[in-house]
Amino acid sequence: MFTLNNVRALSVVLSLFVAQSSIAQPIDISALTSTPDEQAQIEATIKKMVEQNLTFENVGRDALKVEVQAWDIDVRPDFQGLIPGKGSVADGEEVWASKCASCHGDFGESNKFFAPLLGGTTEDDVKAGRVSNLRAEANVPSTTIMKISTVSTLWDFIYRAMPWNAPKSLTPDETYAVVAYLLSEASVVDADFELTDSNIADVQKRMPNRDGMVVYPGLWHTKGKPDTQNTACMQDCAGQAKVVSTLPEHARNMNGNYAAQMRIVGAAIGVNSDKPKLTGKPDDNAAAVRAYAKQTIKGNANHVAVKSGGEASKDDAKTSGASVDAATEEKVKAILTTNACTSCHAASTKLVGPSFKEISEKYSENDAARLGEKIRKGGSGVWGAIPMPPQPGIVDGDISLVTKWILSAEHN
C-alpha cells in the first residue's frame, strides 16, 4: 500500500534529484541521513537516476529507511516511534538550566513568555489520574502538566520543537532527561529517577491527568457522527482579512523587536515592531518580517560597526584595539541563538535581562574574565532580582568570543 508517508519519503529523493540536476555543486543531504552508508546509498540512487535520465512517469522504488525516518518522527501514545534512550533527573536539570530556564523559569513555573508548564497538580491527582484543579469551581490557572494526558506528547513535542531558538537540537538522551526533570518537579517521579524507553510506559500510569482525555467520535473516527450539520455556503467570502486592532505606537516595541525573537521556521512569525511600521497586505508583511528575522539571526555586516579609538577616557581600555570582524560576528550570533541568550538579552533594548549595549557600557575589556565567569555560572543581583541561569554548555573559547563581542561591538 502506497501511503502518505511513502509519498513524503519519495518527495525527498525527487527534490534531491531535481536539485542535483539543476545546480553545479553537490547538495548537502547529511541532515537526512544517520550513517555514511545511508548517505552514500542516497547519492548513488540520485546518480543512477541522472544517468538514466528518468522522468516522473517511470520513477519508482521503495523508500530508504532513512528517508522514511526523516518524515516519520512522531511518537504515539502507545510509544510507537519512540527513540531508545535514557536520561536522569539530575542530567535533565543541567540541560534545563542551560537551554530551557531562560523562557520557562528554573522550575517550569514562569509565565513571562509562555504559560507555566508546572503547578496545579497534587499527589492525589497522580493517584486518581484526574486533576481536580481543572474543575470549573477550582478557578486555578491551568498549566501544561495539569492538562496533558500522555507523557508521549511531552517527549514528542520537546524532541521535535525545543528549544525555541534551536528546534530538534536536543539528543534523545537529553530529551529523556528534560522530561524526567519536569516529571520530578511535578512529583510524578522521584528525584533520583532515570527515564528510559523501557520504563516510560510505567510513568504513563502516574501522569496526573492520564484519564482526563475525552474522545469525540466525530473527530477521532471517520465513521463517527459529525459534531455539526452545517452546510458550507462558499459564497460572498471576504477577499482579505481586516485587522481591526493593533498595539498603540508607544507600546509596539516595549519588549524588543518581536521579529528578532521568533523562529524563522513555521507559520507564526513575530511582527516587526521596529519603526517604521509595516504596511501593505498581510502576505507582503509576512515576507518582510521573515526577511528581517533572518537578517537579525545571521547578522547584517552592512549595519555592524565596531568600536574604535577616540572615545572618552573611561572607555580607553574598551577601545584599545579590540574589534570583531564579520566572521566572528556571525559565530557569536550563532552561539547566542543556540544557547537561548537572545530570549532574555537584546542588542539595545532591555528584555528579561539587560541589553548587550547596557552591559558594554557598564564594563570594560579589563572585566572580560569576570564577565565570562558570570556567563558560565549565572547569578542575580547585579541587574535585578531575576536570576540568569548558568551556561555550562558553552565552551571556554566561545565564552571568550561572546565577551569580546559584547565589550567591543556597537549594539544598535
Image: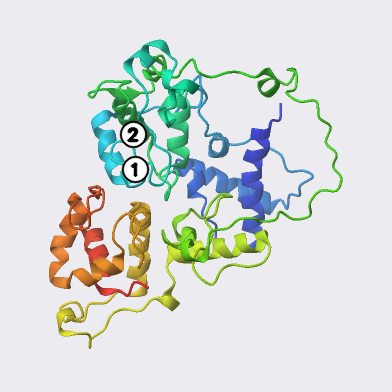
Residue 25 in view (yes/no) = no
Residue 271 in view (yes/no) = yes
Q: Is residue 310 left or right of residue 335?
A: left
Q: How many C-alpha atoms fall within 10 Å of the one at disc 2: few (<14), some, or many (≥20)?
A: many
- Report which residue position mark 1 lands on: 100
The image shows residue 343 at horizontal and vertical percentages of: 37, 53
The residue that appears at 33% across and 63% down in the rendered structure is 332
Q: Nearer the viewer, residue 189 or 58?
A: 189
The residue that appears at 87% across and 45% down in the rendered structure is 235
Which element is circle 2 on? helix
The image shows residue 51 at horizontal and vertical percentages of: 68, 53
Which element is circle 1 on? loop
Q: Quadrant of the C terminus?
A: bottom left
Q: How many C-alpha atoms fall within 10 Å of the one at disc 1: few (<14), some, or many (≥20)?
A: many
The residue that appears at 85% across and 48% down in the rendered structure is 236
CB atoms of marks 2 and 1 within 8 Å: yes
Instruction: State which mark lies toward you, 2 or 1.
Output: 1
The image shows residue 94 at horizontal and vertical percentages of: 25, 39
The residue that appears at 68% across and 38% down in the rendered structure is 7
**Which corner quadrant of the image does residue 84 belong to?**
top left
- Report which residue position mark 2 lands on: 178
Q: Is residue 369 left or right of residue 42?
A: left
Q: Quadrant of the N terminus?
A: top right
Q: Nearer the viewer, residue 332 or 260?
A: 260
Residue type for callout 1: Cys
The image shows residue 148 at horizontal and vertical percentages of: 47, 26
